[in-house]
């Protein structure tokens, strides 16, 4: 007779238990890292698309985000740069393909958008919603800039919170996964000095970096941006930090 060797039931159960504990500890981190990479990549892609649109409008129609002097029409999808309409909707209609535009809010619930809700643009009541071909949602001001509030940054000037606050109709955001949750603004966990931050900041400090970790509390899907001249750039420290990091 041959003696057979194997695992006992207790050994199998203990092994499965250990595997379960390890999985429970690592899977959330893996999911967070995957979502983080997706959000970062989509944000950078959408930002690049909007910047290309601004440059193309400048080249083709001789105006850009900074030269907007008209509000988006009742049906913003019909704004046409070829007939001289200088609205922000005309900029994108004339340069991008595959997008849909509407004044109807696509969210079932309001997004959490704390940093900008503390500024004059916080209500974001007069906006248009562009869904790009890749599914990203771009929310832009539909109103024309008021006198002396045109979306133009003087040569040699640096984008900062004071400029953003005084130019509310130049402010918007990118939601990289559209209607899908979490619909929450990206935030910093620490500032450049290592101090923990408990809430989003409404500031954009050119010389101050912050940390945005790969977790569901901070690395989320809404990125505040500011439109000016032929450029679209981050409007908060957190959005700027994500753009500056490779991963």
Image (cartoon, rainbow, N blue to C red):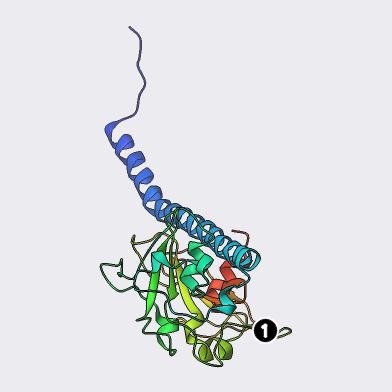
Q: Is residue 199 visible?
A: no
Nearest to the observer: residue 168 or residue 117? 168
Q: Is residue 92 visible?
A: yes
Quarter of the image for residue 54 reads bottom right
**Where in the figure is residue 67, as x and y percent of width and height?**
58, 79
Secondary element type, mark 1: loop
At horizontal 57% and vertical 91% (from top left) the residue drawn is: 162
Quarter of the image for residue 14 reads top left
Residue 230 against residue 158 in the figure, above or below:
above
**Where in the figure is residue 64, as x and y percent of width and height?**
59, 72
Nearest to the observer: residue 186 or residue 47? 47
Nearest to the observer: residue 11 or residue 18? 18
Q: Answer with left or right where residue 162 lies relative to residue 7.
A: right
Q: Residue furthest front?
A: 83
Q: Which residue is mark 1?
A: 158
Q: Residue furthest right?
A: 156
At horizontal 54% and vertical 60% (from top left) the residue drawn is: 95
**Where in the figure is residue 48, as x and y percent of width and height?**
59, 61
Q: Quadrant of the N terminus?
A: top left
Q: Answer with left or right where residue 154 lies relative to residue 17.
A: right
Residue 55 against residue 23 in the figure, above or below:
below
**Where in the figure is residue 3, as x and y percent of width and height?**
35, 14
């Amino acid at each position: 007779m041959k003696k057979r060797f194997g695992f006992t039931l207790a050994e199998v159960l203990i092994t499965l238990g250990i595997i379960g504990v390890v999985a429970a500890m690592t899977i959330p981190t893996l999911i967070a890292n995957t979502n983080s990479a997706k959000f970062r990549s989509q944000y950078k892609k959408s930002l690049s698309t909007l910047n290309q649109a601004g440059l193309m409008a400048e080249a083709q129609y001789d105006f850009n985000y900074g030269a907007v002097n008209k509000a988006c029409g009742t049906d913003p999808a019909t704004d046409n740069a070829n007939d001289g309409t200088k609205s922000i909707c005309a900029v994108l209609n004339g340069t991008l393909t595959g997008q849909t535009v509407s004044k109807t809010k696509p969210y079932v619930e309001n997004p959490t958008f704390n940093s900008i809700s503390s500024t004059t643009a916080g209500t974001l009541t007069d906006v248009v919603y562009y869904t790009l071909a890749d599914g990203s949602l771009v929310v832009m001001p539909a109103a024309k800039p008021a006198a002396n509030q045109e979306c133009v940054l003087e040569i040699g000037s640096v984008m900062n919170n004071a400029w953003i606050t005084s130019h509310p109709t130049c402010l918007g955001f990118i939601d990289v996964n559209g209607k899908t949750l979490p619909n929450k603004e990206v935030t910093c966990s620490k500032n450049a000095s290592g101090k923990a931050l408990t809430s989003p900041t409404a500031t954009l400090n050119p010389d101050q970096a912050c940390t945005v970790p790969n977790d569901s509390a901070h690395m989320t899907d809404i990125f505040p941006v500011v439109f000016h001249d032929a450029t679209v750039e981050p409007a908060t420290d957190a959005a700027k930090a994500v753009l500056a990091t490779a991963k």
